[in-house]
Amino acid sequence: MKRRLVKGILALLAFIPLVGCWNAQEIEKRTIVVSMAIDRNENGGVTVSIQVPNPRQIAGGSGEGGGGGGGGGAVEVYSGSGSTLEAALEELNRKSIYPMFLGHMQTLIFSEELAKQGIAPILDFLRRDPEIRRHMYPIVVSGNAKDALTVQPKLEQIPTYYVRNSIESQIDLERVYDMTLGKAFVDLSHPGKQVPLFYYFKATKDGFAYDGMAVFHGDKMVGALDPTEMNIVLNVREKRRAGES
């Protein structure tokens, strides 16, 4: 009797590892999002656009991409609209063959129009999503945020990586404040502590270029600091001047 009991327990222990991955999803069966852009739509809701790398094009393959368009084939851009961010993401999920995965996002982009109207509901939703990385860069762009996803830089296949590298080079040169989404959450939770700053990009004939940082009062953008004015901000916040170690 004891031997049967022991065998039964061992059988159960051997079975446990097999059921541990019952809900696992292969990475090939996920829509990997590297950037999200959010605009205000004509109905007062939001339009959410996502940038998704096309592995076949990045690898140098000749396969045709999906119907999203943009990025010269290396990426696809898809959009969905809704009265809230959650509703817009649900529409995007319905359009996608595979469920979206937001854990690899590098940048979160807002249109200047939306940023000036207030982004608290959007940030609150993102804060509650366990997939959202706190180390991505929050950005405000002049014009439509979606357009920032379709620009194709000459030196980088994936536009988002070009924008990320541009920001990181400015941080390394100590020309801008190192702002991540996680730091923005903290600053917006304590508005009396620090003024939230997002990276600010302006439209150019070749796409978008870094042009300082957007200044927020609460959850609303109230202006922008050009690269020269960032000297003062860095001196106050970091106890040093930009470009000085």
Image (spheres, helix red, strand yellow):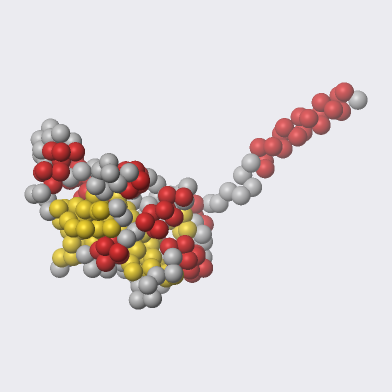
Instruction: Examine the rendering and report whether any part of residue 209 can be seen.
Output: yes
Q: Number of numbered discs present?
A: 0
Horizontal arrangement in the rendering, residue 82 relative to residue 176 (left or right): right
**Residue at point 18% right, 62% down?**
202
The foreground one among 42 and 188 is 188
Give residue 220's position: percent from left, percent from top: 28, 58
Give residue 90's position: percent from left, percent from top: 50, 65
Q: In which quarter of the image is residue 14?
A: top right
The foreground one among 186 and 132 is 186
The foreground one among 11 and 43 is 43
Give residue 152's position: percent from left, percent from top: 25, 63
Instruction: Examine the rendering and report whether any part of residue 154 can be seen.
Output: no
Q: Quadrant of the C terminus?
A: top left
Give the farthest residue toward the right.
Answer: 1
Q: Quadrant of residue 37?
A: bottom left
Give the farthest residue toward the top.
Answer: 2
The vertical placement of 178 against 13, above or below, is below
**Residue at point 25% right, 58% down?**
221
The foreground one among 133 and 120 is 120
**Residue at point 18% right, 58% down?**
223
Q: Quadrant of the N terminus?
A: top right
Give residue 17's position: percent from left, percent from top: 66, 37
Give the farthest residue toward the front.
Answer: 192
The vertical placement of 43 against 48, above or below, is below
**Residue at point 21% right, 53% down?**
215
